[in-house]
Image: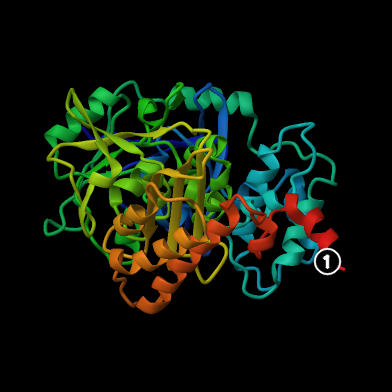
Amino acid sequence: MTTQTIRFYHQGSVREVAGVPATRTVLQHLREDLRCTGTKEGCAEGDCGACTVVVGELDARGGLALKAVNACIQFLPTLDGRALFTVEDLRGANGALHPVQQALVDCHGSQCGFCTPGFAMSMWALYENQPAGAGLPTRDEINAALSGNLCRCTGYRPIVEAAQKMFDYTRHPRVALERDALVATLRTLQRADTFEYRAPDVRGAAFGSPAFYAPVSLDAFATLRAQHPDARIVAGSTDVGLWVTKQFREPGELLYTGNVAELKTVARDAQMLTIGAAATLEDAFAALTADYPELAELWTRFASRPIRNAGTLGGNVANGSPIGDSMPALLALDAELVLRRERTSRTLPLDAFYVGYQKSALRAGEFVAALRVPRPAGTLRFRTYKVAKRYDQDISAVCAAFALHIGDDRTIRAARVAFGGMAATPKRAAHAEAVLDGASWDEATARRAMDALAADYQPLTDMRASSAYRLKVARNLLWRFYLETRDDAPLALCDVNAFAFEADAAAIAKEVP
């Protein structure tokens, strides 16, 4: 077995790392090996953002992409061929503060300071990614950039003000980041073929030393998958990372999707939007929302920016969590999966993919290669809703999606209704759909469909919600969908949503005396 060294750019030079387990996290390496202790550990599950760092990589056009991610759940081998930036990189010559840091000081955005490095890195990513001449980011854009960072003492107002103020200072030269030079360095770090990493048996024979495979082509990925059908496919490790950090599980051999360009592609034709399984959630939702603007709020509320920068839509679908927020919308839109094994591919409707709790129709050696979503039709009325205890970065109690094709005569030609959090798998509501199909879209039909949901779901009671609450919420969401899409005086978003976007602020202000 070939053992290759992990190579990545950090603090002005290329670092080479070997002899550590493949599941060692970036945060552990920073704090324990490199003694870069500015990056903190809070939750060790990608929730609090104290561990936020910025990873730089080559984008599809050969330029530089900078993404804030959670270091606590990223495995160290995923840094191979990339650049790593931490709060230590913000310091300028002679110890001068970066505008991000100066703004936090001037706006009193730090109190105990534990969360501040994570906030600073999320702000730095926003600062560096703001195109010259594009104007200042909006309040919504700032909130989205900071959605993965939790503060327990200062409160968010001064931190948001700092994110606005950081652009007022003299533009700071990119600390340790000359883009052209960095792009050239990253090109020299790119692998021509599969990167294989296996550490020596550093923990004893009882645990072994699982291999980490990172192929660079789809064919190589398919071959490795067939050769290692029990290997754990890992993309953003936003799920698998928690198995290691919270459950102390040994995931075994790892097969990484992050270096396969063909799995990251997003393409459109007249009929279908095709999203590669390794496209990040951020890129996937951007593509989906371009076709379906109704997904904008779900995009914003799906986890946080650092999680969406790392996690993938294909991983979310393949994991099959009953509370995965992407699946109800995809089910309602009649999405299908492209499944591949070696050189053979097949297409499967998403609603046939889940066969039980976290069980799928994947065959041995098979993997999800892409998702295909039909392009919008003029007759479609579509909405998604997420109900959780927090607006940002929270697990759904109920997630709903409704898609009705309605003719000029108000007759429903086709209905697809799907929920997450209501069953052991994301699931369509067959009884409610039967009520809707062929009926007139009016109040009586909506109420009959609401009643039919009781035959579709018998939800569990858990720490997030009771069974009765979930069923009531499901009914009420269908009613809300009717109120928003009825022909007679449909209600606008600002009339039914307490969390309206900035675009609705002016309309709301006019209505409030």
Q: Nearer the viewer, residue 295 or 42?
A: 295
Residue denoted by label 1? 512
| Image side of residue 310 versus residue 248, left or right | right
| Position of 235 relative to 469 (above/below) | above
Q: Quadrant location of the N terminus? A: top left
- As helix, strand or loop, the secondary structure at mark 1 comes to loop
Residue in the picture at 60% in, 68% down: 114
- Please indicate, yes or no, whether residue 239 appears anywhere in the rendered image: no
Residue 456 on image: x %, y %: 30, 63
Q: Residue furthest front?
A: 409
Residue in the picture at 50% in, 45% down: 309
Q: Quadrant location of the C terminus? A: bottom right
Q: How many numbered marks, from 0 up? A: 1
Q: Quadrant of residue 347?
A: top left
Task: Say few, some or many: other residues with alpha carbon within 10 Å of mark 1 (under 14 / 14 to 19 / 20 or more).
Answer: few
Mark 1 is on which residue type? Val
Q: Quadrant of residue 245?
A: bottom left
- Please indicate, yes or no, whether residue 55 appears anywhere in the rendered image: yes
Residue in the picture at 49% in, 48% down: 308
